[in-house]
Amino acid sequence: EPEVTQTPSHQVTQMGQEVILRCVPISNHLYFYWYRQILGQKVEFLVSFYNNEISEKSEIFDDQFSVERPDGSNFTLKIRSTKLEDSAMYFCASIDRLNTEAFFGQGTRLTVV
Amino acid sequence: AQTVTQSQPEMSVQEAETVTLSCTYDTSESNYYLFWYKQPPSRQMILVIRQEAYKQQNATENRFSVNFQKAAKSFSLKISDSQLGDTAMYFCAFGGGNKLVFGAGTILRVKS
């Protein structure tokens, strides 16, 4: 069964440092997403990516965040200068052309200290 | 903008009993999908069941079924013969306009 792969599974970083979270979506999918879940809270939409550009972003996705699909397979989320409140589980998801189901990666737990 | 509301923060059920989790949504889209995702303590997001809005027949997956009321914009999940492994957070999600929007979640605890 196809799957979305995220690395690392857990990252600890110092406040103010840059982090890059990596995702390998399902190869024939066209839409890619990042979601965030602060511990015990709801899953929040960050950004969607289609045709090599951002198609939609939430108010959470400010100038500290960026996304890239540098080589046609990886899909990365960069946080330039991490804050304590960026500590959360970050999920990558991809959706096929028919938009029938979002496949989620296992998540990256980011801890900012 | 779409919104998804889960009005039950927590639910409990005895093992082998049936429980229903509620979800309502709001949208102006005509074509969309509705989903229930399970998030166990591992925090992985696992698809439980999916409903296409254009289908009137309620989706079923083994012990899981939905009651989809399109006019009322309601999409509840029924879990029959609850098992201890069903203990998890359950999220209702709306899929349309190429985005998934999640409800706040319901913590379900199955008691032995």
Image (cartoon, rainbow, N blue to C red):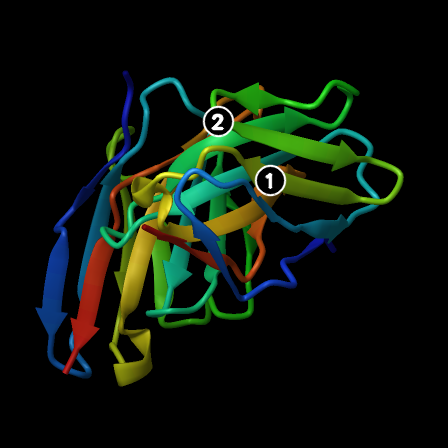
Q: Mark 1 highlights which residue?
A: B77
Q: Is residue B18 above or below residue A19?
A: above
Residue B69, by quadrant, is top right
Apparent side of residue B108 relative to residue B35 in the rendered image (left or right): left
Looking at marks 2 and 1 on the same chain, the residue that comes earlier in the sequence is marked by 2
Which residue is pictured at 60% across the width and 40% down the height? Answer: B77
- Of labels 2 and 1, the one closer to you: 2
Q: Mark 2 highlights which residue?
A: B63
Q: Secondary structure at mark 2?
A: loop
Q: Secondary structure at mark 1?
A: strand
Apparent side of residue B95 relative to residue A21 in the rendered image (left or right): right
Q: Residues within 10 Å of mark 1 (few under 14, many from 20)?
A: many
Which residue is pictured at 66% across the width and 42% down the height? Answer: B76
Which residue is pictured at 11% across the width and 80% down the height? Answer: A14
Depth check, front residue: A49 or A5: A5
Say which chain tag 1 marks.
B
Image mark for residue B47: none
Which residue is pictured at 25% across the width and 77% down the height? Answer: A81
Residue A64 appears in the picture as rendered = yes
Say which chain tag 2 marks.
B
Residue type for callout 1:
Leu
Residue A18 appears in the picture as rendered = no
Residue type for callout 2:
Arg
Q: Is residue A100 above or below residue A36?
A: above
